[in-house]
Image: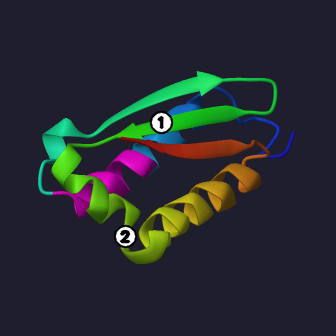
């Protein structure tokens, strides 16, 4: 069995931890960072909640920071043979 075949529910937590780490590193209020995970037929959806005043820091100029976070999540989930989507909730 390959490492990708042995991946299970543990990866969802890994993805959540990855996004949480990145978001907490960017914001002024790391205690207010919260991630909700839901599963659908296509894969997992991670909803990132931050304090209102930190929303701009997570999105970044022209959405570059959010795009980068999504690219990292996509690379990690593709390597795990999964699909993940990051939504930043206002």
Please state, as top left, top right, bottom left or bottom right, where the N terminus lies in the image: top right
- Residue 21 magenta-drawn? yes
Residue beneath the point at 52% across and 69% down: 68
Q: Check disc 2: other Cα within 10 Å, few if <14, some if 14-19, many if 20+.
A: some
Q: Nearer the viewer, residue 20 or 57?
A: 57
Numbered tag placed on residue 47 in the rendering: 1
What colour scheme has been applied to the protein in the rendered image? rainbow
Residue 7 pos. (x, y %): 71, 36
Who comes first in sequence, dot 1 or dot 2?
A: 1
56 lies left or right of 59: left
Q: Residue furthest right?
A: 1
CA gap between label 1 and label 2 equals 17 Å
From the viewer's perspective, is residue 77 above or below residue 1? below
Q: Nearer the viewer, residue 82 or 38?
A: 38
Q: Which residues are magenta?
A: 19-27
| Res 65 → quadrant | bottom left
| Res 57 → quadrant | bottom left
The secondary structure that most of the magenta stretch takes on is helix
Residue holding disc 2: 60
Residue 24 pos. (x, y %): 25, 52
Say which element carries label 1: strand
Residue 49 pos. (x, y %): 34, 38
19 lies left or right of 12: left
From the viewer's perspective, is residue 15 above or below residue 10? below
Residue beneath the point at 39% across and 62% down: 59
Residue beneath the point at 29% across and 53% down: 55
| Res 89 → quadrant | top left
Mark 1 against mark 2, which lies toward the viewer? 2
Residue beneath the point at 20% across and 43% down: 51
From the viewer's perspective, is residue 87 above or below residue 53? above
């Amino acid at each position: 069995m390959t490492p990708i075949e042995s991946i299970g529910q543990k990866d969802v937590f890994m993805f959540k931890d990855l996004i949480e780490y990145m978001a907490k590193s960017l914001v002024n209020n790391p205690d207010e960072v919260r991630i909700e995970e839901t599963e659908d037929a296509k894969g997992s959806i991670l909803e990132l909640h931050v304090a209102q005043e930190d929303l701009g820091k997570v999105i970044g100029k022209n959405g570059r920071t959010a795009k980068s976070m999504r690219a990292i999540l996509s690379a990690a989930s593709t390597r795990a043979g999964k699909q993940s989507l990051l939504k930043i909730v206002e």
